[in-house]
Amino acid sequence: AQTVTQSQPEMSVQEAETVTLSCTYDTSESDYYLFWYKQPPSRQMILVIRQEAYKQQNATENRFSVNFQKAAKSFSLKISDSQLGDAAMYFCAYRSGNNNDMRFGAGTRLTVKP
Amino acid sequence: DGGITQSPKYLFRKEGQNVTLSCEQNLNHDAMYWYRQDPGQGLRLIYYSQIVNDFQKGDIAEGYSVSREKKESFPLTVTSAQKNPTAFYLCASSKLGQGGRSMEAFFGQGTRLTVV
């Protein structure tokens, strides 16, 4: 099965600054999808952004953008102009395009300092 | 409103008893998933299903069972064989696109199971 690795258990950022969360994955597939999810204290999982592996252009959603490096199997999330409401656990996820298996990393806890 | 409903939100059971967690969706999604989350940890896949009457084991299927008799429902049974069942359980569903490709997963609000 594919594996997803988030090497930063915790990150901290000053309000209005930029932070980058790292994610790497291991796969032999060519067809797959990558996601970043946010989990606030309510524990509700919220989709932040998604990336199709066949697309070379990096996805962007308002203040959130990714740096997708397919050859390096890297999928980092950049949060610009950080806000207090961005504080949460962030999970990177991989979905197989072949069998729809979906795996998550261990998560990064983001703290935003006022 | 469309969405995924997990019930109950909190569940207490005695050790050695089987317990079933409910997951219902009205999003007309084909794929459904069960994950386990332990404190401060990520989501680990228990089972998933792409279609009615079919499901596949994830990384930690031992001690769990599922059924998919209806498209809308994917209940998870935590059996007495599960050694450490106390955890937060999340159910998710997703659409399947062309050629079986799926979109992002939508999640329920979770069930906190405590075994005493």
Image (spheres, coloured by chain):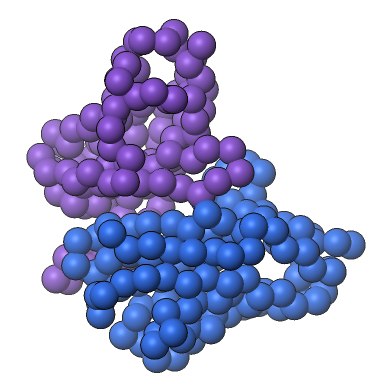
Residue B39: % across, % down: 59, 38
Instruction: Determine the residue positioned at 79% across, 68% down.
Output: A13
Residue B53: % across, % down: 10, 40
Instruction: Determine the residue positioned at 72% across, 63% down.
Output: A11
Q: Quadrant of the N terminus of chain B?
A: top left
Decide if residue A20 is on the left or right side of residue B100. Answer: right
Note the chain letter of the purple one: B
Instruction: Determine the residue positioned at 48% across, 58% down.
Output: A105
Note the chain letter of the blue one: A
Task: Establish if B90 lies above or below B63.
Answer: below
Task: Establish if A27 lies above or below B70.
Answer: below
Decide if residue A6 is on the left or right side of residue B100. Answer: right
Q: How many labels does the image show?
A: 0
Does the rendering let one see residue A66?
A: yes
Residue B81 position by quadrant: top left
Does the rendering let one see residue A47?
A: no
